[in-house]
Amino acid sequence: MIVTYADIDGFKNLSGISFAPDPKYNIIVGPNAQGKTNLLEAMWILSGCRSFRGSKEKDYICLGGSRMASKVKILDSLREQKISFEMTRSAANNKTITLNGVRQKGTRALFDVFKCIAFIPDDVDIIKGSPEKRRNFVDMAASQLNPVFVMHINKNNAIMNQRNALLKGIIQGNTDRSILDIWDRQASQEGAVISYMRHEYIQKFNGICGKLYRTISGGTEKLELEYKSNVFRPEDLEKPCGAEAYELYYKKLSETADYDIRTGSTHAGVNRDEILIKINGVSARDYGSQGQIKSAALVMKLAQAEIYMQRSKDAPVIFLDDVMGELDENRQRFVFDMIKDMQVFITTPNENALLPEIKGKILRISGGRIAEEEENVSSHRE
Ligand SMILES: Nc1ncnc2c1ncn2[C@@H]1O[C@H](COP(=O)(O)OP(=O)(O)OP(=O)(O)O)[C@@H](O)[C@H]1O
């Protein structure tokens, strides 16, 4: 899959951006704070995913501006498709999303259309950060393969919000405790499905991460991922997901219900799961060196691309935000080997820090605009 055209205006500091990307490498160059990452982000939001750097939708519109528009044409093995995301500043931040000219209710339909994977410096937080960061990573990666997964995640989050509000109501004495049971029955079905889907994805993911990490570490180190369900034992997750699994989940929620009521929040279920990441048998989060953590995060992103490639005829589009210059030559070569058949957008303040064989389009960004566009040039020039 490739982006054949991008047209962005009013997204953060970007204005009048309009270009036909190179089908291979696109190097977005400029000093700090010119809008290089904004350019990746403006395209990324058309994938249906939330901003890769956590921006809120209301902040997409340029400060002092009244509207934003981001539009791309993408070409996959079947056809060319047009996606657009426009928003005007108003009380409701009016948003219009269209796919091939047809207005969409939300971003969900885009999930299945524009597939991209972003590498950003903060990816190390997948390893170093809270369990929520790891859960979000796995959930987003699994959703890109199977959009039904997002539905279960959203439904579970909605149920959990209701449940937590109810817990507060019970302790304040204005809600009947018996209502909790109705929500727990619903939570059990969604939670069990999510646990099984996480288990399945991580099993597959673990094999690929292990293989890639062995290569990146020169065969000396071992990376392993383990899904620690808050409800199920690994052997439970080998059985089919059905009535027995729902019952186990319900039992777990019931066990913590008294404590949940006292504290006003839910302490059991998928929102308490952990994904253990181990290097050479010990927790990478607790014992990993900076280099090991960086490599592990990189490998997890590359594994995501590989799984996607195995399931689909179309390779995802790759966004590398200021990460290549940070890698030593060996790691850069490893990454480029993996993504050599994909379209890549790379941001960097210094194109000379990239491998010399990277050849494609250079876009020089200054003050949110394309100051210069050069075709078919190597990133490395004297
Ligand atoms: N809503 C907004 N409206 C206008 N400008 C914004 C908005 N949000 C962010 N910016 C501006 O965007 C610029 C940052 O852009 P971006 O993060 O893309 O920089 P960059 O070129 O990737 O820089 P670096 O190399 O430092 O990562 C800053 O000047 C910031 O003030």
Image (cartoon, rainbow, N blue to C red):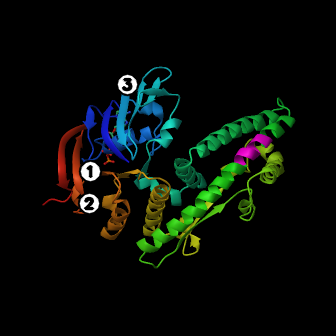
Q: Nearer the viewer, residue 103 or 333?
A: 103
Q: Which mark is residue 354?
A: 2
Residue 186 part of the magenta segment: yes
Q: Which residues are magenta?
A: 185-191
Looking at numbered disc 3 in the image, what kind of residue is underneath it?
Arg
- Give the residue pinned by disc 3: 67
Q: Which mark is residue 27?
A: 1
Question: Is residue 81 positioned above or below 346 on the image?
Answer: above
Q: Position of residue 40 (x, y in %)?
A: 36, 44
Q: CA distance from mark 1 to mark 3?
A: 27 Å
Determine whether label 2 and label 1 are within 8 Å by CB.
Answer: yes
Position of 279 compared to 358: left or right? right
Position of 67 compared to 158: left or right? left
Question: Is residue 285 positioned above or below 282 on the image?
Answer: above
Q: Nearer the viewer, residue 328 or 363?
A: 363
Q: Identify the residue at the far bottom of this view.
A: 220
Sequence-wise, the earlier of marks 1 and 3 is: 1
